[in-house]
Image (cartoon, grey):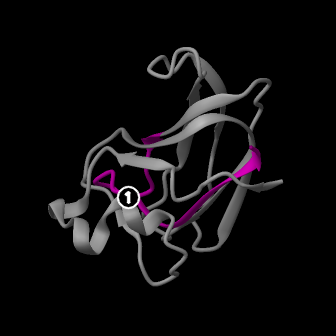
């Protein structure tokens, strides 16, 4: 298994705290810096969309949340190369713990997908905010 996120991977997020993309933007999800993070605005659901630009086989998702701002219910959805705007491939639901440590979640992916959408339907934060310091997707290119 190897990381599937590269310089060519396009990342989109549902919101950024106070629209402050410099301090809390999507670029901090994958920059490798443990001091930076993506913060969502309040309200649910929130999501992260990754477009790999090619078909990939996903094995797992690794996430480091800030405790207290954890997406406690996350659904992984994907789209195939033939229909990149159709997120009809349900890859599973996982339930992260409310901790600061890195968590790894296995994904059931039977065929190559082009896009991965992580949908956070619930949060440990009363206002529905999500804070992530690190995001990685592992699998086979």
- Placement of the C terminus among the 4 image quadrants: top right
* Residue at the image point whose x is 51% and y is 52% from the top: 8
| Image quadrant where residue 18 sits | bottom left
Q: Is residue 130 magenta?
A: yes
Residue 54: percent from left, percent from top? 61, 35
> Which residue is at 28% across, 54% downward?
127
Question: At x 63% / y 46%, what residue is drawn?
Answer: 95
Kindly state the secondary structure of the residue where label 1 is placed: loop
Say few, some or many: other residues with alpha carbon within 10 Å of mark 1 (under 14 / 14 to 19 / 20 or more): some
Write down the quadrant of residue 58 in the picture. top right
Provide residue 98's location: percent of width, then percent of height: 56, 63
Q: Is residue 91 above or below residue 59?
A: above
Residue 71 horizontal side relative to residue 113, left or right: left
Q: How many marks?
A: 1
Residue at image point 23% right, 61% down: 17
In this view, the residue in front, 30 or 93, is 30
Residue 28 rendering spot, x and y as whole percentages: 42, 69
Depth check, front residue: 133 or 111? 111
Magenta stretch contains residue 88: no
Q: Which residues are magenta?
A: 119-141
Judge left or right: residue 115 versus residue 16. Answer: right
- Direction left: furthest residue: 18
Indicate whether 74 appears above or below 84. Answer: below
Instruction: Write down the residue under mark 1.
Output: 125
Relative side of 49 to 112, left or right: left
Residue projecting furthest to the right: 1
Query: Residue 91's x, y, as percent?
Result: 67, 29
Q: Please, what is the dominant secondary structure of the magenta stretch?
A: strand
User: Is residue 37 toward the left or the right of residue 51 in the image?
Assistant: left
């Amino acid at each position: 298994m190897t990381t599937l996120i590269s310089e060519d991977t396009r990342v989109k997020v549902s919101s950024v705290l106070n629209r402050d993309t410099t301090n809390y933007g999507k670029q901090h999800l994958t920059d490798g810096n443990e001091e930076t993070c993506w913060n969502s605005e309040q309200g649910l659901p929130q999501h992260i969309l990754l477009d790999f630009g090619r078909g990939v086989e996903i094995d797992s998702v690794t996430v480091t949340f800030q405790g207290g701002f954890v997406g406690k219910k996350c659904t992984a959805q994907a789209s195939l190369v033939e229909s990149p705007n159709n997120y009809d491939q349900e890859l599973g639901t996982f339930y992260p713990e409310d901790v600061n440590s890195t968590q790894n979640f296995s994904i059931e992916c039977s065929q190559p997908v082009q896009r991965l959408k992580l949908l956070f339907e619930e949060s440990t934060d009363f206002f529905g905010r999500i804070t992530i310091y690190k995001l990685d997707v592992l699998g086979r290119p």
